[in-house]
Image: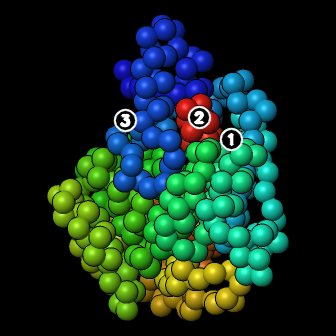
Amino acid sequence: MAYLLYGAANQLARHPREAVVRKARADRFRHLLSARDLDIEDVDAFCQVADEFEAGFVPTHLSGRTVALLFFQSSTRTRLGFETAAVALGAHAIGMEDMSASRTNARVGESLEDCAAVVSRLCDAIVVRHHEPGVAARMAAKSVAPVINAGDGWNEHPTQALIDIYAMRRGLGTLRGKSIAFGGDPRGRVVRSLIQLLRFEAPREIVFCPPPRYGIPPDILTALIENQISFRIITDIRQALTDCDAITMAPYDMSEIGEPAASGFVSPHQTPESYVITLDKIEQTGSRALLYHPLPRFEEIDPSCDLSPNAMYFEQVRLSKFMRMAVLDRLLSAS
Ligand code: CP
């Protein structure tokens, strides 16, 4: 039997020993900073508990808990996703609409470490997004509450990767033996986190369709080689539509991801035709590849695809609520 491991699942335990096992697993990590910290049992458990939430299970043990949302970079899905997940668990979400109004701003310059030390004494968990790699870990070092990395610059976005695995398992049944493509900028934090989780899924191959000016980051190549996952590089997304079971798309250039909100920097978003998925291309290739995207999108998936049976990216957003509930449930239950 797969593990049902933590808070919500503990409420379902039929035997006290099951609850003990679950509690032990829940204590395995205090923060969620990197997909590297997860093992296959964690991923299975998150997916299983997300299923329970989707089926309508309503926990009572998180009622009145408080989750602080500290978003130093813009966000729609992650910010509102964690807020709606907290509310669905009976918890409260607090936060500032504009973190430049906090004392961490350039004028006062309170350190992120002090911000974590202070905010964690007012809440039960912190969800943080920032343009600098490593900020979530820095804040976790000073926080007395669990910290969830909601995207730290180029580094990682572990909850998005959990959502992507959950949605791909849902669409494909299993990723074992499947060909999974990554279209667009391969340097993004979601790719880095997702590659870490794909090592548990035994795909047949990974197919990259990256812009020629950005290579696959060395740490991603190392992870693939170490885990004996085959990979190849293509230059036209039609090839992925023809060959692959699923394609997870990203914008053609994600340079913005490493920029402070105040910089006003805008990535170049012109996407060459050979990297754009359109309904015409799906029909011409007869592709049955399922299309995923953490969003937001630019031109890489044309809106003409939205109603095709291939399009999974909005379903991916719907499922994200249950995965974020599972993440909050686990970290709040262990704290
Ligand atoms: N996928 C994702 O992280 O979206 P947001 O930037 O809107 O949170």
Whole-percent x and y of residue 326?
57, 38
Among the two numbered marks 2 and 3 on one chain, the one whose residue lies closer to the N terminus: 3
For residue 271, above or below residue 102: below
Q: Label 2, on which residue?
A: 335
Q: Who comes first in sequence, dot 1 or dot 3?
A: 3
Residue at the image point whose x is 32% and y is 78% from the top: 216
> Which mark identifies residue 41?
3
Find out whether the residues at labels 1 and 2 contact each other: C-beta distance under 8 Å: yes
Per the model, the C-alpha gap separating discs 2 and 3 is: 20 Å
The correct choice, above or below, for 315 with respect to 220 in the image is above
Q: Is residue 78 left or right of residue 245?
A: right
Read off the residue under disc 1.
Answer: 124
- Residue 117, quarter of picture: bottom right
What amino acid does circle 2 point to? Answer: Ser
Q: Position of residue 108 (x, y in %)?
A: 77, 77
Find the distance from the CA under tag 1 to the CA under tag 3. 25 Å
Q: Residue at x 37, y 92 (%)?
A: 213
Give me the residue at 25% from left, 70% from top: 221
Q: How far across and how far down the image is residue 256, in percent?
A: 58, 83
- Which amino acid type is marked by label 3? Glu
* Along the viewing direction, whichever of 118 and 277 lies nearer the viewer: 118
Expressed as whole percent of the image width and height from the top left, the position of residue 103 reads 78, 70
Q: Nearer the viewer, mark 2 or mark 3?
A: 2
- From the viewer's side, name the closer residue of 54 and 335: 335
In this rendering, the answer to whether 27 lies above or below 251 is above
Mark 1 nearby-residue class (10 Å; few <14, some 14–19, many ≥20): many
Q: Which secondary structure lies at badge 1?
A: loop
